[in-house]
Amino acid sequence: MQISDQAKRMLQIAYRTLDDKQGGDIRIIDIREISALTDYFVIVHGNNTSHVQALVEYLTKAFSQEGYPLVQHEGGNHSSWVLLDYGELIVHIFLKEEREFYNLERIWSDGKELSSQFTTIKDN
């Protein structure tokens, strides 16, 4: 299945923004064929709650500047897991320990890992 231009652009923004702010182990998983919830998950972790919040703030600002509205935001300023729903993609920003505990990558392992397609965009 081909990635739509809009989804590709959104995933590029997410990857670049999270990478620029030192988000840990950024993963992009295509779940279109296994879930009606959304098309893609972006999973990343921060080093502490302040870092998690900074990742949230930078990402929401980047999407807003590009005209992509936030559909739903779950988790507060001191949360160890924040969910940002942008319709076509949902971004999960964790503390590292919480990410390891919930292990969404394992739960959604039937999805297609796309991260390698976006690791080179920071150089373009």
Image (cartoon, helix red, strand yellow):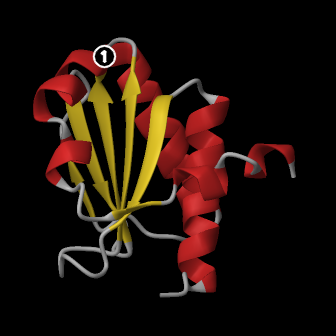
Q: Is residue 31 left or right of residue 14?
A: left
> Where residue 39 sits in the image (x, y, percent)?
34, 75
Picture coordinates of residue 33, whole percent (x, y) = 27, 82
Q: In this view, does 66 lie to the left or right of 94?
A: right
Q: Which percent across, then down, holds residue 16?
A: 66, 45
Quickly name the residue at label 1.
49
The residue nearer to you, when weighing 83 against 30, is 30
Tell me which residue sits at (38%, 75%) in the image.
88
Picture residue at 56% right of the left edge, 66% below the top: 10
Task: Check the image and report above or below for 24 versus 90.
Answer: above
Quadrant assignment, res 6 = bottom right
Viewer can see residue 43: yes
> What residue is rendered at 31% in x and 79% in y?
32
Q: How crowded is mark 1: few (under 14 residues within 10 Å), some or many (20 or more)?
A: some
The image shows residue 42 at horizontal and vertical percentages of: 40, 52
Secondary structure under tag 1 reads: helix
Question: Image height check: is 100 above or below 70?
Answer: above
